[in-house]
Image (cartoon, rainbow, N blue to C red):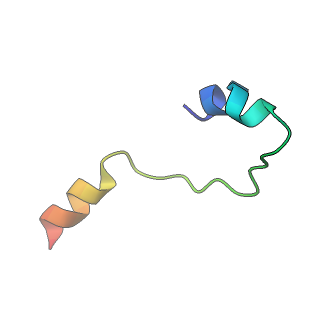
Amino acid sequence: VIDAIRDSAFCTVPYFEFVEIIPAIEDGYVEYGSSL
C-alpha cells in the first residue's frame, strides 16, 4: 500500500514530502474499541 501511495501522482508531484510514516495496524481501532 505504501509503495502504491508513494508512486501515485499525489506523491510524485514535488509539492508533498513524507517526513515520517507511522505504521498502523489495519482495523486496529476496531480491536481497540472492543477491548474497552
Image coordinates of residue 2 in percent, x first then y, are 60, 35
Farthest-out residue, right? 14
Left or right for 30, reference 28: left
Image coordinates of residue 15 in percent, x first then y, are 82, 44
Image coordinates of residue 14 in percent, x first then y, are 86, 39
Tell me which corner region of the image, top left, top right, bottom left or bottom right, holds residue 36. bottom left
Tell me which corner region of the image, top left, top right, bottom left or bottom right, holds residue 13. top right
8 vs 27: above or below? above
Q: Residue at 16% of width from left, 68% of height from top? A: 35
Q: Can you say which quadrant of the picture contains the N terminus? A: top right
Left or right for 30, reference 26: left
Q: Residue at 69% of width from left, 33% of height from top? A: 10
Q: Nearer the viewer, residue 6 or 9?
A: 9
10 vs 33: above or below? above
Tell me which corner region of the image, top left, top right, bottom left or bottom right, holds residue 3. top right
Q: Residue at 24% of width from left, 64% of height from top? A: 32
Q: Residue at 19% of width from left, 65% of height from top? A: 33
Q: How many marks?
A: 0
Farthest-out residue, bottom? 36
29 vs 9: above or below? below
Left or right for 2, reference 20: left
Q: Nearer the viewer, residue 18 or 15?
A: 15
Image coordinates of residue 29 in percent, x first then y, are 29, 58
